[in-house]
Image (cartoon, helix red, strand yellow):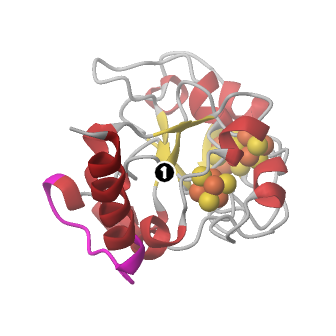
Amino acid sequence: MKRREFLKKAGATISMIAALPEISFGKGLLKSPVTTNRLRPPGAVPEEIFAGKCIRCGRCVEVCPYRSIRLLDIRAGLFTGTPIIAAEAIPCYLCMKCVLICPTGTLRKISQEQTRMGLAVVNRHRCYTWLGSTICRTCFDVCPFKGKAIILDELRPIIVNDHCTGCGICTHACPITAEDGSKAINIEPIYAQETVPWK
Ligand code: SF4
Ligand code: SF4
Ligand code: SF4
């Protein structure tokens, strides 16, 4: 394909995406990449309008000192080029640099405490301490808001929904990894809370 033709087609695709005011969560090319431990950076606008607002400039990726953010590749369909964080691999350390640099307001200028990337959920059938097999308080110890976002009840971790930022630092640190890569504490997107099977 000639360069001009390619650019024309690429431009048409981007215009189509930008013209979408809202994307409903469906299957295939319209399926949102946001799911368990796959999160948008802090301050993200609602997922329904994210792909239409993000211009795929990659500035959030460049500014992140921890390399927490990557851009989705072509397999993400309409969401290609938008930023995502894999919490169990590299969580968000809440430095808030990305929200300051985003040129479109796709990442809104919020504070650490206002961040709600998702919500940590303890799988009580997998957590060592909840099972009573050994005492582990790793998630509690690493949480930047311990005692507020996560508390201990007879050493068992409990999330305080109103204060959890969904940063994923607890998920990353959790020593238990299941076959599917998930941990004993995982971050669920806010909108998917009602579908968490083991809450
Ligand atoms: S807040 Fe900081 S650590 Fe978190 S994703 Fe943005 S730039 Fe990276
Ligand atoms: S900085 Fe903002 S507009 Fe640019 S890729 Fe990141 S979220 Fe999208
Ligand atoms: S409980 Fe986990 S996700 Fe929530 S604020 Fe603490 S470390 Fe972050």
Q: Is residue 129 visible?
A: yes
* Quarter of the figure with residue 30: bottom left
Q: Is residue 137 visible?
A: no
- Left or right of 172 on screen, residue 100: right
Viewport quadrant of the N terminus: top left
The crowd level at tag 1 (other Cα within 10 Å; few <14, some 14-19, many 20+) is many
Task: Write down the residue under mark 1.
Answer: 82
Residue drawn at x 42%, y 39% as measured from the top left? 124
Main SS type for the magenta part? Answer: loop
Give the camera-side residue of 21 and 138: 21
On screen, residue 136 above or below 99: above
Residue 151: image location, x then y, percent: 73, 48
On screen, residue 50 above or below 125: below
On screen, residue 53 above or below 151: below
Residue drawn at x 38%, y 63% as measured from the top left? 14
From which residue to which does the magenta span run? 18-28
Q: CB of residue at label 1: within 8 Å of ligand 2?
A: yes
